Amino acid sequence: MFSFNGTGVAAADIGTITDAGTQTFSVTTPNAVNPPFGSFKFGIACATNCSNGNSGGGYNDPLSFTVANATIGDFLVLSTNAGALGPAYFAADVVWTMDTQSFGATGAIGVVTTPVPEPETYALFLAGIGAIGFMAKRRRKTT
């Protein structure tokens, strides 16, 4: 199960879900639950030809899907009702059984990210501060 949130996204917007194998996938909504990370609005789960995941016969990378009518900002929503590992922007579980809607023993993998400015952002910031300081110093000399 791959779980995520999306504002302004409908289940019908999620399509072309494939991997490199013979599995087929479906969109689960609402409240795709991934216990360590909480509840998400959408989930992508294996529907047919599902394996048990893990290194002994897992899914064939990559899992690909498209979301129409969305921007990156639509996905910056944390999960709700988070468990011990806290909220996440998305979570992936390597074992998910569609028939019982439950997770397997291998657990979940989740990522919580905090935006970190790129080095170029700091360079531009410092250049701007320097330019303001230069202009202030220059202005003081002329008055």
Image (cartoon, rainbow, N blue to C red):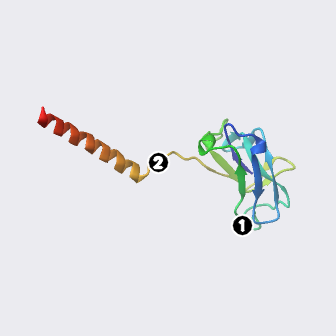
Q: Nearer the viewer, residue 28 or 112?
A: 28
> Quarter-wise, where is residue 32 in the image?
top right
Q: Could one spot residue 107 in this view of the protein?
A: no
Q: Nearer the viewer, mark 1 or mark 2?
A: 2
What secondary structure is found at the residue carrying circle 2? loop
Which residue, as the protein is rendered here, is positioned at the far front?
142
> Residue sitting at 77 percent across and 51 percent down?
15
Q: State the CA–CA distance, disc 1 to disc 2.
A: 32 Å
Residue 41 location in percent, x, y?
A: 72, 39
- The numbered mark, 1 or 2, whose residue comes first in the sequence reads 1
> Residue sitting at 46 percent across and 48 percent down?
116
Task: Give the number of the disc on residue 7.
Answer: none
What secondary structure is found at the residue carrying circle 1? loop
Task: Give the number of the disc on residue 55.
Answer: 1
Residue 58 location in percent, x, y?
A: 75, 64
Residue 59 location in percent, x, y?
A: 75, 63
Amino acid residing under circle 1: Ser
The residue labelled by disc 2 is: 116
Q: Could one spot residue 119 in this view of the protein?
A: yes
Q: Residues within 10 Å of mark 1 (few under 14, many from 20)?
A: few
> Residue sitting at 78 percent across and 51 percent down?
45
Q: Residues within 10 Å of mark 2 (few under 14, many from 20)?
A: few
Q: Quadrant of the C terminus?
A: top left
Q: How many marks?
A: 2
User: Cβ–Cβ below 8 Å for labels 1 and 2?
Assistant: no
Which residue, as the protein is rendered here, is positioned at the far top?
143
The answer to whether 36 appears left or right of 49 in the picture is: left
Amino acid residing under circle 2: Val
In the image, residue 4 above or below residue 140: below
Residue 104 location in percent, x, y?
A: 77, 53
The answer to whether 26 appears left or right of 69 in the picture is: right
Q: Nearer the viewer, residue 92 or 67?
A: 67
